Image (spheres, rainbow, N blue to C red):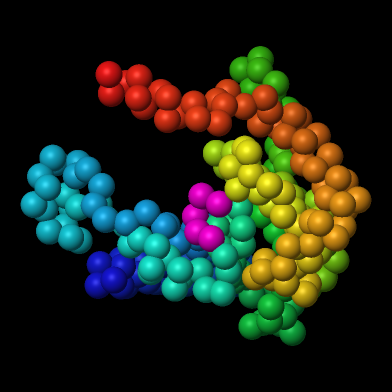
Amino acid sequence: MACYAAVMERMDHAVGKVVASLEEQGVLDNTLILFLSDNGGCAEGGDLVKNSGTPEAAWGSADSFIRYGKAWSNVSNTPFRKHKHWNHEGGIASPLIAHWPKGIPQDREGKFCRQPAHVIDLMATCADLGEAKYPESYAGNEIVPLAGKSLKPLLSGREQPIHDVIFWEHEGNRAVRKGDWKLVANGPKGKWELYDLTKDRTEMHDLASEKPVKVKELIQDWEEWAKESYVLPWIWKPGYMKARAEHVSQ
């Protein structure tokens, strides 16, 4: 954690340099700064292979690459369940701080916005505020349309949702949030779990068996999105990575 604290301190200095430069140029108040954390603490721990191939490299040196493991990840994610890689709240929930004095109403300063958003919204927000038209094609190739929504309404102080539904998929871990309902599963063979996030943000009470109709509705939503977004069919099947690793080791 000494290394972790050192990284935080250096990041703080770097952000300070950016803010100071904007202030010197006289554009700080009219510049939107969006600051957010990565998604979830990493449950994996210990050393990774050093770039230099020197296992004796001191932690925190340029040749080291360490991860802080499940115990500290759990501290970082408290009170949410799971860690990075999974789609429970501990693996996807990130705080976002927005600074824009000329764009955010003064009465919103220091206030929380409780509406859910997604990292895909950042590009849409930049395009919207910069009055840029996102291209439909490039070099003769059709471009997939933006999936995100502009955060401008939320930054302006509105509390209406910008998303009807939000989807996730990462290495077979799946989730969909629709309103206050969230359906989530671990791995491509994992059982779907249903949570009411207004009453159970920490996902402790699975309501899937009590509300089969809602589960069916959300599964259908997720599968339609997965096909449209090139998630399905998966290029790998459960057990594929293990079999591949065994093949490579031989």
Q: In this view, does 108 lie above or below 153?
A: below
Q: Indicate left or right for 150 with 13 as reference.
A: right
Residue 84 lies in the magenta-colored region: yes
Q: In this view, does 172 lie above or below 1?
A: above
Q: Which residue is drawn at 56% across and 74% down?
A: 79
Q: Residue 246's spot in the image, x, y percent? A: 35, 25
Q: Which of 225 and 72 is in front in this view?
A: 72
Q: Residue 230's spot in the image, x, y percent? A: 68, 28
Q: Nearer the viewer, residue 134 or 31?
A: 134
Is residue 87 visible in the rendered structure shown here?
Answer: yes
Quadrant of the drawing holding the N terminus: bottom left
Q: Residue at x 61, y 53 (%)?
A: 87
Farthest top residue? 140
Q: For residue 250, which quarter of the picture?
A: top left
Q: Indicate left or right for 247 with 23 as reference.
A: left
Is residue 164 visible in the rendered structure shown here?
Answer: no
Q: Residue at x 79, y 66 (%)?
A: 196
Region in magenta: 82-86
